[in-house]
């Protein structure tokens, strides 16, 4: 019997892969979605509502090391080699991938950001709108030109210390600094009936995994919708080890997978979408040196990086601090900095995610001097009155940051591990120092005092965002300098498409997931149009 | 009707069994409870050492040897807590290092306990809210 040839195979079920699978199925194509992990059930496989003390022994006996049941992207071990300034790489093998443990921050890139792309904001805007409707994004309309408003459900207000930071940001503007202080926007519905998922109940467990499945994930929205079309085949606990090329060497014929039982199988397709993550997609292509006539695969790597400054606002000491859970820690954003200002001494832009409140399962301030009742009182007071400011800066794209293959280490299937090279440039350090200065000034202008600050940025005290890597297979119109075209199709292999953030040719300060989803949706529509025209 | 003797017998049946230390010895556990209670009053009632000892038994949250060395130093020296606290940023002795170790572990465990959350921090979260009010007060 002849082997079935699916129209499209999608590798990776995270934000990009999930939406691609849904869109392709919706347009009548037969799709196979390949995921290395299994399906996790919210509330059963992760549930932060338990009592840490009561559950502790049970969890330890089961091999868990955290007192609270959560889904995380750092449990996967030995899946990459880091070189340089402590690169980290998050990975979650599960249906839905890292959309299970993302914070849900849903920010559009703006027209200013797309000025560095080969496609304009207007080209992506309709996909942003469609994604926001599907995802159920809540937020306030802020009217910022480079952080465009979307189709929002009601937003969530700030906590008291964050409002004080907002006052500080207003005074920054009074000193002729570009600055806006806004509530964060999240793919979590605040209004019942808006999307077919539970409405948020404000327990604050978003990043630990939403146990009531209110937060948008690939596993709770696009993948079930794709399954309902009857055109999606799921290949769970299946790891792609090789892309199988047709005999002519110019087209993809399928992929080889290794299943949970160790058996190998070849799946056939007319088109292949890689959405395995920026690092893993590059790794897979580099392993066979595919789609790499430009030599750009693995290059142009960037992410967000940062540090934290904490302020105290004694003015809010008497507030009701009995339930600060809200929408997880970060409720607000200091943004707009350097969108237009050309006086800066570094490349790129940054934003500052801000949070506040007493969170017993993850105290923001865990140390105060002394002992006894005074220690307890001090710790409580600091947690009640604090606001945390966490830098999210664009890492300069340079020759000092890239992905290649580890020449020695391999995974359990014999595939070389990816090696992530991160060496901060002077511009990165300069940006971080500007952040420290700006955060400290914002705290003081808001009437607070600086509780903790790195004081000075160094390569040692910067922290890379392990989940925001983008850019190893950049989009472009020139095949000599880019990997995919503006439809996210390989310049070299006409039936190979990329559905993850590896295609980002430039990166602003904003979180990548919404843009990843919008671009992947757009890619899937273009791919389906080609299929209809018989071009696959 | 239950008489007093029946009531006591029934209460014993339903009472939580006493915790038998896993990583530390019973003597060390008792000394640790005393030490941690001095650092963070309320820890004993919140069963903070039970939480810490369980973690140590499973290799989570530090190593048993550091606790044992610290507790031995504590039982030999009985240095005033004020002195340990005064040197906590630059600890130079076994006991001063142990003060920092026990303090970090106790703060985390206490904050995770129901007693710590409710009585110390005044936390009333982890409940279903229709909407999150945010800050409803005006400050400075």
Image: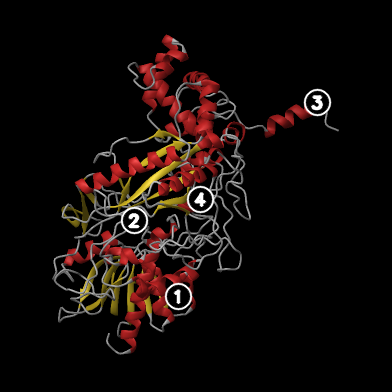
Q: Tell me: residue A213, above or below residue A475.
A: above
Q: Are marks 1 and 2 on the same chain?
A: yes
Q: Earlier in the sequence, mark 2 or mark 4?
A: 4
Which residue is disc 2 drawn over? A509
Task: Verify CB contact (< 8 Å) between mark 1 and mark 2.
Answer: no
Question: Is A46 on the left or on the right of A280, as rendered?
Answer: right
Identified at 42% across, 31% down, the residue is B56
Query: Image quarter for residue A117?
Result: bottom left
Question: Is A370 on the left or on the right of A111, as rendered?
Answer: right
Give the label, 1 or 2, closer to the camera.
2
Is residue A95 visible from the viewing direction of this image? no
Circle 3 packing at 10 Å, graded few (<14), some (14-19), many (20+), is: few
Find residue A500 and report its horizontal and vertical position in percent: 32, 66
Instruction: Check the image and name the residue furthest to the right.
Output: B1
Identified at 57% across, 33% down, the residue is B116
Please, which chain is the residue tagged with disc 2 on? A
Q: Earlier in the sequence, mark 1 or mark 2?
A: 1
Question: CA gap, disc 3 to disc 2?
Answer: 70 Å
Secondary structure beneath dot 1 equals helix
Give the label, 3 or 4, closer to the camera.
4
Which residue is disc 1 drawn over? A226
Secondary structure beneath dot 3 equals helix
Which residue is disc 3 drawn over? B4
Which residue is disc 4 drawn over? A205
Please, which chain is the residue tagged with disc 3 on? B
Identified at 14% across, 66% down, the residue is A295
Give the quarter of the figure containing the N terminus of chain A. Answer: bottom left
Query: Image quarter for residue A499?
Result: bottom left
Secondary structure beneath dot 4 equals loop
Question: CA gap, disc 2 to disc 4?
Answer: 24 Å
Give the label, 4 or 1, closer to the camera.
4
Q: Earlier in the sequence, mark 4 or mark 1?
A: 4
């Amino acid at each position: 019997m002849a082997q079935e040839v699916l129209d499209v195979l999608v590798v990776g079920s995270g934000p990009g892969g999930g939406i691609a699978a849904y869109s392709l199925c919706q347009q009548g194509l037969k799709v196979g979605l390949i995921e290395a992990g299994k399906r996790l059930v919210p509330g059963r496989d992760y549930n932060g509502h338990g009592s840490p003390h009561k559950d502790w022994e049970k969890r330890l006996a089961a091999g868990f090391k955290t007192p609270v049941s959560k889904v995380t992207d750092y449990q996967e071990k030995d899946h990459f080699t880091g070189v340089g300034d402590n690169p980290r790489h998050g990975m979650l093998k599960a249906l839905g991938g890292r959309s299970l443990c993302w914070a849900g921050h849903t920010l559009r890139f703006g027209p200013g950001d797309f000025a560095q792309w080969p496609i304009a904001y207007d080209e992506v805007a309709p996909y942003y709108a469609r994604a926001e409707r599907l995802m159920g994004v809540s937020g306030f309309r802020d009217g910022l030109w480079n952080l465009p408003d979307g189709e929002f459900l009601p937003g969530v207000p700030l906590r008291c210390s964050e409002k004080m930071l907002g006052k500080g940001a207003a005074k920054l503007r009074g000193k002729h600094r570009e600055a806006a202080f806004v509530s964060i926007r999240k793919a979590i519905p605040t209004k019942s009936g808006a999307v077919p998922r539970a409405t948020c109940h404000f327990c604050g467990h978003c990043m630990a995994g939403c146990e009531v499945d209110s937060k948008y994930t690939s596993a709770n929205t696009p993948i079930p919708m794709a399954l309902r079309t009857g055109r999606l085949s799921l290949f769970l606990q299946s790891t792609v080890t090789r892309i199988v090329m047709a005999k002519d060497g110019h087209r993809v014929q399928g992929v080889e997978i290794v299943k949970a039982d160790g058996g190998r199988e070849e799946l056939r397709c007319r088109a292949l979408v890689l959405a395995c993550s920026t690092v893993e997609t590059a790794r897979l292509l580099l392993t066979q040196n595919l789609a790499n006539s430009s030599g750009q695969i693995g290059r142009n790597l960037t992410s967000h990086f940062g540090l934290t400054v904490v302020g105290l606002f004694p003015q809010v000491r008497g507030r009701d601090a009995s339930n600060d859970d809200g929408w997880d820690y970060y409720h607000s954003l200091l943004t707009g900095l350097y969108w237009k200002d050309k006086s800066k001494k570094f490349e790129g832009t940054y934003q500052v995610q801000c949070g506040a409140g007493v969170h017993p399962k993850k105290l923001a301030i865990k140390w105060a001097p002394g002992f006894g009742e005074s220690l307890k009182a001090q710790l409580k007071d600091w947690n009640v009155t604090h606001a945390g400011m966490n830098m999210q800066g664009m890492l300069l794209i340079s020759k000092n940051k890239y992905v290649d293959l580890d020449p020695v280490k391999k995974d359990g299937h014999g595939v070389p591990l990816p090696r992530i090279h991160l060496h901060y440039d002077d511009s990165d350090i300069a940006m971080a120092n500007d952040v420290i200065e700006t955060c400290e000034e914002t705290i003081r202008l808001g009437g607070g005092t600086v509780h903790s600050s790195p004081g000075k940025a160094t390569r040692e005290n910067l922290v890379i965002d392990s989940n925001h890597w983008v850019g190893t297979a950049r989009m472009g119109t020139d095949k000599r300098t880019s990997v995919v075209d503006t439809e996210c199709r390989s310049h070299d292999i006409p039936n190979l498409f990329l559905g993850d953030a590896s295609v980002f040719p430039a990166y602003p300060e904003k979180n990548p997931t919404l843009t990843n989803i919008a671009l992947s949706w757009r890619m899937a529509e273009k791919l389906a149009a080609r299929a209809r025209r018989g071009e696959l | 009707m239950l008489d007093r003797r029946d009531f006591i017998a029934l209460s014993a049946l339903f009472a939580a069994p006493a915790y038998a230390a896993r990583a530390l010895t019973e003597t060390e556990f008792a000394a640790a409870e005393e030490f941690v209670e001095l650092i963070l009053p309320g820890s004993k009632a919140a069963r903070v050492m039970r939480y810490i000892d369980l973690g140590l038994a499973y290799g989570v949250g530090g190593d048993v040897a550091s606790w044992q060395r610290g507790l031995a130093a504590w039982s030999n020296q009985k240095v005033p807590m004020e002195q340990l606290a005064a040197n906590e940023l630059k600890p130079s002795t076994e006991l001063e290092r142990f003060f920092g170790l026990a303090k970090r572990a106790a703060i985390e465990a206490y904050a995770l306990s129901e007693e710590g959350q409710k009585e110390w921090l005044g936390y009333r979260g982890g409940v279903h809210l229709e909407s999150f009010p945010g800050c409803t007060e005006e400050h400075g």
